[in-house]
Amino acid sequence: MGRTDILVTGAGGQLGRAVLHCCAELGLQAHGVGTLSMPLDDRAAVLRAIRELAPRAIVHGGAVTNVDGCESESLAAYRINGLGTAWVAEAAAAVGAALAYVSTDFVFDGTAQGVPYATEHPVRPLSVYGASKRLGEEAVLAHGRGDFYVVRTSWVFGPGGKNFPKAILDRARSGQPLKVVTDQVGRPTMTHDLAAALLDLLQLRPAGGGIYHAANEGHASWHQFAVGVLQAAGLGHIEVGSQLAADLKRPAPRPQWSVLDTDRLTRVRGKPLPSWQDAVRRYLELDAVAQPGRGGKQY
Ligand SMILES: NC(=O)c1ccc[n+]([C@@H]2O[C@H](COP(=O)([O-])OP(=O)(O)OC[C@H]3O[C@@H](n4cnc5c(N)ncnc54)[C@H](OP(=O)(O)O)[C@@H]3O)[C@@H](O)[C@H]2O)c1
C-alpha cells in the first residue's frame, strides 16, 4: 500500500467529513479515523495507528466538542483534547508527518472588544473546553517543529453537522419561537472553507510552523448570524427575538468577543476565506439534511 497522504482524526465529525471530501477532490490519499479506530484517550493506540499509517501529514480535528459537557467531564476533556493531542504530536514527530491541529477561539477570554485577536495575543480560556484545547496547543507547539501548525477557528458549521444554522432552521421550520444571543460576537466558519485552508497550509508548509487563525470573512453576533441564515433560506420574515448570553445560564462561560485576526493565513494563501454570508448560501445548497425534501445537492 502506498503511503497515506493525509490522516484525518475526528473523521466522522462535521469538519472531518469536509476534510475527507476536499482530499478526494484534490486527489489526495486520505485515511479517516475516529473514536473506535484511534481512541485519543489511549496513547498506545494513537502511536500504533500513526506508525502503521505513516501519513505525510495529519489534520487533527478529533476532540470532545461539547463545551458545556466538558465542565462536568473535565478529566475526559483534558485527556482527549490535551493528552490525546500530545500523543498525536508525538507520533507525528516520530513518523515525520506535518501536523495541523484544529483549535478554537475559546482559548481567548473575549475582553479584546472591537480588536480581532492576533495569533500571538495572550490566551486565557474561560472554560474547561477552552483550557483543554489550549493544553493541546501547548503540546503541539512544544515540539518547535517547522511543519507543526495550530489552526484556531470559530463557530464551525457544515453539511450534515449538528450546528447553529441547522438548529435555527429546524426551529424556524417547526414554527418554534426564536430567541438568540446578541452579546457574543465571532466569525462563523464553514467546514469546506476551513478544510481547504487546512490542506493549503499543509501543502504550502510556511516556514516556522506556529499558530494560524482560519475563519470566514466578516463577523456577527449569534443574533445576526441567525438572521443571515434565515434570510438566505428565504425565511427572512420570521422574527428573531433577542436575549443576553447570561439569560441562558449555560455551565461553560464563552468569550463575548472572539473575532479572530486571520491576516497571517491570508498572507500565506494569498487570499482570505470567503465571507460568512457566502458560506451560508453554499451551506444551504449543499445540506440535504438541513433542507429535507428541498433538493439540496448531494454532498
Ligand atoms: N464546532 C465548532 O464550533 C468549533 C469551533 C472552534 C474549533 N473547533 C474545533 O474543530 C474541530 C472539529 O470540530 P467539529 O465541529 O467537526 O466536531 P465534531 O463534529 O464534534 O467531531 C469531533 C470528532 O472527534 C471525534 N472524537 C471525539 N472523542 C474522541 C476520542 N476519544 N477519540 C477519537 N476521536 C474522538 C469524534 O469521532 P467519532 O465520531 O468517531 O466519535 C467526532 O467525529 C475540533 O477539534 C474542535 O475543537 C470546533
Image (cartoon, rainbow, N blue to C red):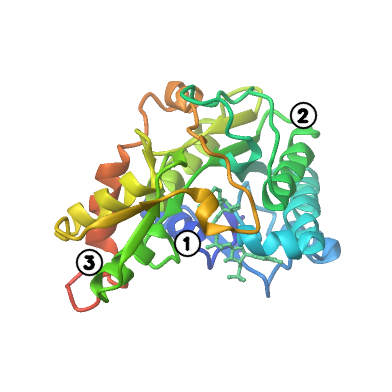
Instruction: Give the crowd class for mark 3: few <14, some 14-19, many >=20 residues within 10 Å.
Output: some
Q: Nearer the viewer, residue 240 or 157?
A: 240
Q: How many marks?
A: 3
- The vertical placement of 143 against 46, above or below, is above
Gap in Å between the C-alphas at discs 2 and 1?
A: 29 Å
What residue is disc 3 on?
Answer: 297
Residue 7 visible? The answer is yes
Disc 1, ligand 1: is the CB inside 8 Å? yes
| Residue that appears at 41% across and 58% down | 164
Q: Mark 1 points at which residue?
A: 14
The kind of residue tagged 2 is Gly
Task: Please tell me which of labels 2 and 1 falls first in the chain.
Answer: 1
Location of residue 10 with respect to 125 vertically, above or below = below
Give the secondary structure at mark 2.
loop
Q: In which quarter of the image is the C terminus?
A: bottom left
Amino acid beneath label 3: Lys
Q: Position of residue 85 (x, y in %)?
A: 74, 50
Q: Residue 144 carries which label?
A: 2
When the figure is inspected, residue 278 is found, relative to residue 53, above or below; the finding is above
Q: Residues within 10 Å of mark 1 (few under 14, many from 20)?
A: many
